[in-house]
Image (cartoon, rainbow, N blue to C red):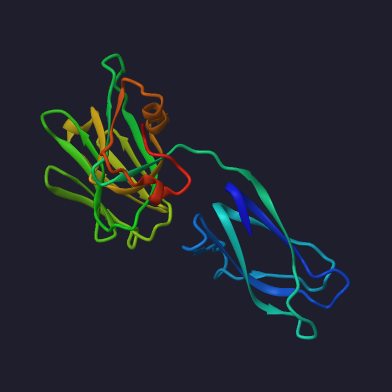
């Protein structure tokens, strides 16, 4: 099944073939943005297989534990009524998904400078989604006081966070699979929470990083979606040519190849 736009899918419902003995008794759900690179959806309380129908007429609906965001959905039959054949009526529930996406070719960068009028807060956060086929690259470089900095980088498919040449935390693996991964950095005083997909670790950070002054994306080859600093969408600001955000784009930006459905930064 193909949607014209990326869709947030929240539930699926199945029936058997009308007036027949054809229905599925179990199946897998796969999703993709491209139609080539697929990922299986797994419910939190199962191994991934969805129980299907017991007759051709009853509707069996499943609400997904976590909504799926995709353009393509594939249903793979695992088992069906032994006295019939594979038969299916399928309904998808959800809504159109909109977001701000930008592509980076390894030479492009995004720079955000805090306004001097912004007041200090004990809580700061940066969140984003990324996808890439490269196993290395810097997603974030945030400068603090006295030349202290915080880095968030991919290395051999893992996401590493470090400061002053010291590794603070490492999370995830095989993150260079061209699927979207969610990342969130949240500073609470001197504590830093790093979340990659559903895994979170907490570390201590130097006092000089109690406020981040400049945030940059550099040396990254892939796509970023909804890059938020304290709920401020930096990609949206860059597209609006806000003076707070500078987009440095190389001459041969290939973001259209990487992100498919989005244009490069201006």
* 234 horizontally vs 97: left or right: left
In this orientation, which residue lies closer to the viewer: 226 or 58?
226
Q: How many marks?
A: 0
Placement of the C terminus among the 4 image quadrants: top left
Q: Position of residue 101 (x, y in %)?
A: 43, 40
Q: Position of residue 236 (x, y in %)?
A: 42, 30
Q: Residue at x 76, y 85 (%)?
A: 82
In this orientation, which residue lies closer to the viewer: 29 or 252?
252
Residue 226 seen in the figure: yes
Residue 230 seen in the figure: no
* 51 horizontally vs 215: left or right: right
Residue ranking furthest to the right: 19
Q: Position of residue 209 (x, y in %)?
A: 20, 33
Q: Quadrant of residue 136?
A: bottom left
Q: Position of residue 264 (x, y in %)?
A: 38, 39
Asked if 98 appears above or below 238 in the picture, the reply is below
Residue ranking furthest to the bottom: 83
Q: Quadrant of residue 16?
A: bottom right
Placement of the N terminus among the 4 image quadrants: bottom right
* 110 horizontally vs 148: left or right: right
């Amino acid at each position: 099944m193909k949607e014209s736009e990326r869709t947030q899918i929240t539930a699926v419902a199945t029936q058997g073939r009308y007036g027949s003995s054809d229905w599925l008794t179990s199946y897998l759900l796969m999703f993709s943005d491209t139609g080539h690179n697929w990922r299986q959806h797994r419910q939190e309380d199962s191994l991934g297989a969805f129980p299907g129908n017991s007759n051709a007429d009853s509707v069996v609906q499943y609400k997904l534990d976590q909504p799926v965001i995709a353009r393509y959905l594939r249903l793979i039959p695992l088992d069906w009524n032994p006295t019939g054949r594979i038969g299916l009526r399928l309904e998808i529930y959800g809504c159109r998904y909109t977001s701000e996406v930008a592509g980076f070719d390894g030479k492009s960068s995004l720079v955000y400078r805090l306004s001097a009028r912004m007041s200090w807060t004990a809580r700061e956060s940066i969140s984003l989604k990324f996808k890439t086929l490269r196993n290395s690259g810097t997603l974030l470089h945030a400068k603090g006081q006295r030349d202290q900095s915080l880095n968030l980088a991919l290395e051999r498919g893992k996401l590493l966070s470090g400061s002053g040449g010291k590794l603070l935390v490492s999370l995830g693996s095989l993150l260079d699979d061209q699927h979207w991964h969610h990342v969130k950095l949240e500073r609470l005083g001197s504590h830093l929470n790093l979340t990659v997909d559903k895994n979170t670790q907490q570390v201590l950070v130097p006092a000089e990083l109690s406020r981040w002054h400049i945030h940059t994306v550099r040396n990254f080859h892939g796509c970023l979606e909804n890059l938020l600093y304290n709920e401020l969408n930096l990609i949206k600001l860059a597209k609006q040519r806000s003076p707070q955000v500078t987009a440095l784009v190389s001459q041969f930006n290939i973001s259209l190849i990487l992100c498919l459905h989005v244009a490069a930064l201006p």
